[in-house]
Image (cartoon, grey):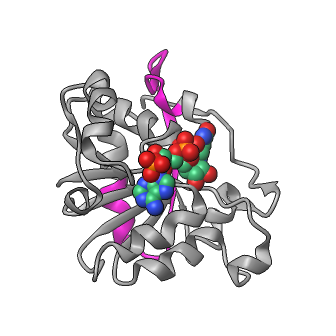
């Protein structure tokens, strides 16, 4: 599997720390050229490699960590998303009417036609997401939701590899609603920093 994070702001860097902690290679990209991102990427760890957006999108699994309104620009950068897994770490603080009444990730998924689409890593503030997810023998929980059950398993495996405890919430408009920002209202699980103890 190959991984890329699109967006190298607070959340993109937090996730890059998680990959670096486990020595997992990850490309990072934004609208800026890779040379502009490289010093910060290198400072996070040797497995974090700054690339152009086009090169980063060659990865199998792409994490969206851009402002919600920018997702369409990212989607346009590839002619087809078939065969890709897209993880939506964004929160949409826009009125529901602007989302055609859909959960934000279902709205975003429409722009990434053909991709296996999973919402995840969005419910924690960036500083918490950047911290070591292993605390007192427990693993920090991340919530995953998707309308495609097959898409969730590899993302859960990645979350585990990164040291998190993935909790599957089911479909985007069912359990996934618990981690969705809806207009100015936060889903009840957003910001809940939970841990799962080893069993
Ligand atoms: N901050 C948090 O605590 C937090 C927590 C959970 C979820 N989120 C969600 O995560 C997402 C990112 O938040 P953030 O706080 O990390 O934002 P941020 O600090 O403003 O970073 C956004 C990043 O996206 C890049 N970007 C913007 N437009 C782009 C485009 N069209 N193509 C490629 N890269 C683009 C920006 O870099 P360039 O300007 O160089 O392109 C920047 O690196 C948002 O959807 C937010 O709701 C944030």
Where residue 90 sits in the image (x, y, percent)?
A: 56, 56
Residue 147 colored in magenta in the image: yes
Where residue 58 sits in the image (x, y, percent)?
A: 19, 63
Q: On screen, 25 above or below 82?
A: above
Residue 196 colored in magenta in the image: no
Residue lying furthest top = 136
Q: Start and end of the magenta stretch?
A: 129-155
Residue 38 versus residue 46: which sits nearer the camera? Answer: 38
Q: Quadrant of residue 56?
A: bottom left
Q: Is residue 139 left or right of residue 178?
A: left
Where residue 126 sits in the image (x, y, percent)?
A: 56, 35
Q: On screen, 131 above or below 100?
A: above
Q: On screen, 67 above or below 99?
A: above
Q: Quadrant of residue 79?
A: bottom left
Residue lying furthest right = 184
Residue at position x 28%, y 82% in the image: 80
Residue at position x 24%, y 63% in the image: 54
Q: Is residue 153 left or right of residue 23?
A: right
| Residue 146 appears in the picture as rendered | no
Q: Dividing the image into 4 quarters, which one contains the N terminus?
A: bottom left
Residue 143 versus residue 61: which sits nearer the camera? Answer: 61
Q: Quadrant of residue 155?
A: bottom left
């Amino acid at each position: 599997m190959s991984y890329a994070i699109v967006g190298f702001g607070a959340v993109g860097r937090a996730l890059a720390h998680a990959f670096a902690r486990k020595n997992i290679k990850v490309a990072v990209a934004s609208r800026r050229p890779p040379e502009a991102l490289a010093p910060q990427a290198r400072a996070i760890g040797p497995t974090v490699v700054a690339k152009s957006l086009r090169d980063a999108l060659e990865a199998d699994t792409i994490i969206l960590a851009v402002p919600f309104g920018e997702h369409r620009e990212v989607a346009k950068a590839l002619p087809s998303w078939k065969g890709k897994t897209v993880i939506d770490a964004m929160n949409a603080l826009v009125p529901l009417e602007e989302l055609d009444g859909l959960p934000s990730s279902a709205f975003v998924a429409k722009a990434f036609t053909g991709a296996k689409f999973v919402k995840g890593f969005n419910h924690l503030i960036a500083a918490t997401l950047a911290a070591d997810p292993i605390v007192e023998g427990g693993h920090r929980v991340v919530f995953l939701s998707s309308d495609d059950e097959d898409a969730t398993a590899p993302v859960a495996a990645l979350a585990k590899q990164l040291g998190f405890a993935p909790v599957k919430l089911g479909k985007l408009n069912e359990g996934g609603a618990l981690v969705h920002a809806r207009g100015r209202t936060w889903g009840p699980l957003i910001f809940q920093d939970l841990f799962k103890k080893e069993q």
